[in-house]
Image: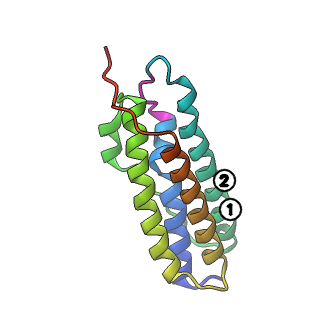
Amino acid sequence: MLPDNQHQLLNRLAALHHRSLPTYLTYAKPWIPVGQEDDAHVIDDIAADHHELVERVLQVLEKDDRPIHLGDFPMDYTDLNDLSLSYILNELKIYERKLLATLEEMALWADKDGPAFRLVQRATGLAVGHLQNLEEMGTQAPSIRP
């Protein structure tokens, strides 16, 4: 059985990724202007990584036989509905930077010999890769819907 603080940390890790901005955007797709269709896959790719991580975390938590709380999407995400892909990609960069800071803090609290630390490290590696991919895509001026 996991110590309470490690169970809570893993629950938070699962919730962060289950209710992440990229996951939300798979339900509320941004407006994609002509010529940017190929860039839209990045959202689905990040969300798929988040889903895979959540599955790994849930496997550990389910063995613990305690409640799991994944919560709801933040209401702030609805402010991004119907905005252009260019704008959303910039928001995702900001989101990933904040996620990295949160994960670094979580790593400080994770038991270095336990599953929480390994899963936080995995999440950190994914976030670094996602941020690099987003930054390599470049920054375009946000498109305005005609």
Task: Report crowding for label 1: few under 14, some 14 to 19, many 20 or more residues within 10 A (C-alpha).
Answer: few
Write the residue at 43% across / 49% down: 93
Write the residue at 53% across / 31% down: 40
Write down the region rendered in magenta: 27-32
In this rendering, the count of numbered labels is 2
Tag 1 and tag 2, C-beta contact below 8 Å: yes
The answer to which of 56 and 103 lies nearer the viewer is 103
Q: Is residue 119 left or right of residue 25?
A: right
> In the rendered image of this protein, does residue 40 appear above or below residue 12?
above
Q: CA distance from mark 1 to mark 2?
A: 6 Å
SS under mark 1: helix
Write the residue at 46% across / 42% down: 24
Q: Amino acid at mark 2?
A: Glu
Q: Position of residue 22 (x, y in %)?
A: 49, 44
Q: Position of residue 78 (x, y in %)?
A: 33, 39
The answer to which of 78 and 100 lies nearer the viewer is 100
According to the image, what is the colour scheme of the structure? rainbow
Residue 56 got which mark?
1
Can residue 72 be seen in this snapshot? no
- The residue lying furthest to the top in this view is 146
Task: Report crowding for label 2: few under 14, some 14 to 19, many 20 or more residues within 10 A (C-alpha).
Answer: some
Q: Examine the image and state in which quarter residue 86 appears.
A: top left
Residue 30 got which mark?
none
Q: Amino acid at mark 1?
A: Arg
- Quadrant location, the C terminus: top left
SS under mark 2: helix
The answer to which of 100 and 67 lies nearer the viewer is 100
Residue under label 2, please give it. 52
Write the residue at 64% across / 72% down: 65
Q: Position of residue 135 (x, y in %)?
A: 48, 47
